[in-house]
Amino acid sequence: MKKTWWKESVVYQVYWRSFYDTDGDGYGDLEGVIQKLDYIQELGANVIWLNPCYESPDVDNGYDISDYCSVMSKAGTMDTFERLLQEVHKRGMKLIMDLVVNHTSDQHPWFKESRSSIDHPKRDYYIWSKKPNNWRSYFTPSVWEYDEQTEEYYFHSFAVEQPDLNWANSEVRQEIYSSMRFWLDKGIDGFRMDVINLLAKQVGFPDAENPADISYLGNNPGIHEYLQEMHEEVLQHYDIFTVGEIPFVTPEDGLLYVGEGRRELHTLFHFEVCDYMSHWDMQRFKEIQRRWYKGLWGKGWNSQFLNNHDHTRLVTRFGNDTNYRVESAKCFAVLLHMLPGMPYIYQGEEIGMTGVRYQSIDDYHDIAMKNKYEEEVEKGRDPKEVFESLLHLSRDNSRTPVQWDDSPNAGFTQGAPWVKVNPNYKEINVTEALANPDSVFYFYKQLIQLRKENPVMVYGDYQEVLEDHQQIYSFIRELDNERWLVVLNISEQQVDVSLPETLSAARKELLLTNYKNHLDFHGELIMSPYEARVYRLL
């Protein structure tokens, strides 16, 4: 297997507006990221993924870009960004930026020109139609929005303020490639590519048999030609790392994007877990890992994550954020860092931050949640029932400010935070975590250090053990003569684990665990709730 620096990396995602505010306006900023770089370095992550900081009206938290070559005033200035990049590199870390090129803001000069007249030279920079079809967008009941000025509809996969670019137009593609070079020439180390498989659209926009299944938005003919052109014109000329956000894909589809001979992307996020598994489902998770390992191993690279800025924090969604918060946070950390692929840590995950539950829809800022709430209430559903149904998977669950200490606003800001701080910040915060040698933070640090020192965690083969067990997830990673056994009790019950005889009889060295005391008996492992163990097989 080809070895590369990025396969061996651990990525730390910085959602900067909720990270650390230095100017008191209630929004995190790039200066705040600079001031906390030593913290990220102490954790051990070596790649920082920075969410969009480009100029934007901020309708969708920066994913509606009005200028690809500038920095949003909330985030700072270009000078601040350049200092951030310099400070990241000074610490031996790398920085990747969000590339959002499926759509722009409706305030982007291109769109203003495009909608000004049907005869404007930039009209074809976006997708216009006289007659809409029946497709849904991610955030609204239709992908089409009527524009009174030119009496046509424009296409938007997300909010009405986020019109999709027309990638079939070669001038659009060249504009995007130019903006990519702008940042790469500054020295950034790559891109996380937002919904990159949505760039190509179905020819003719035929009506869908089931409009609610919006998979018709992605993986359409032409997408691989676009990405291969992007690689040819831009990506191959830099030593960088690319990861594509790619919904609606199977492992077979995924390999077309990240296959090592394809000259497209290095790795991808698929969403079979985070989009389609609302609560923990052991057998489904095992089956997903099995298929993706079989589909990609030795041919392409996978990513491992269980939360990010779009998905509820993992201890709340998949673990237990009350009685076993610390134990389940550590258990899932072992799972993510020991599975084949690249682990991603979302800010606050490393201290076991939990999801939030506000009391009113007015406290939420998530445009997807608010639009869905309005849509369902307009249908006549009970507002309270709608609100309750949307709480668990609201994107704001993971967007609350990082909890730095137990001072007002969790030490995030001296002003009024843009979104309310989780009330549990007095018990769960970075200061507490750094003072406690048994904290989630130091456990993550230990895991990351193990990965740096042991190639088996990166390049080792993967073999499941106890495949059908309902509470236990166990597997072996093997590289050359090194064999590691991972045993995880992902449940709230004590479980007696009988390993296969060859493993039960094998000599083992315990490398890592999240419990101090072990109650093994006659070859059985007696696993406490959310207990994780990693053994070296001797």
Image (tube, helix red, strand yellow):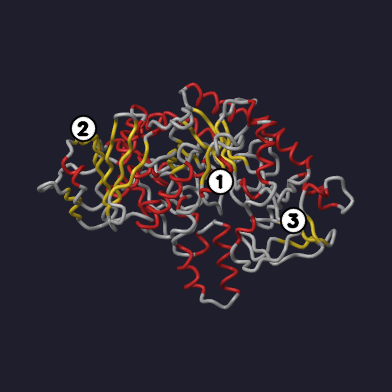
User: Relative to residue 155, is residue 31 depicted above or below?
Assistant: above
> In this orientation, which residue lies closer to the viewer: 121 or 524?
524
The mark lying in front, picked from 3 and 2, is 2
Q: Position of residue 1 (x, y in %)?
A: 45, 31
Reading the image, the residue beneath label 3 is 203
Of the numbered discs 3 and 1, the one sitting upstream in the chain is 3
Give how far apart the Cα atoms at labels 3 and 1 are: 23 Å
> In this orientation, which residue lies closer to the viewer: 352 or 300?
300
Q: Are marks 2 and 1 in contact (CB under 8 Å)?
A: no
Reading the image, the residue beneath label 2 is 538
User: Which amino acid is tagged 2?
Assistant: Leu
User: Relative to residue 111, is residue 36 depicted above or below?
Assistant: above
Within the image, what quadrant is residue 532 found in? top left
User: Which amino acid is tagged 3?
Assistant: Val
- Mark 1 lies on a secondary structure that is strand
Of the numbered discs 3 and 2, the one sitting upstream in the chain is 3
Q: Position of residue 515 (x, y in %)?
A: 21, 44
Reading the image, the residue beneath label 1 is 245
> In this rendering, would 228 be left or right of 323?
right
> In this rendering, would 332 be left or right of 374?
left
Of the numbered discs 2 and 1, the one sitting upstream in the chain is 1
Q: Are marks 3 and 2 in contact (CB under 8 Å)?
A: no
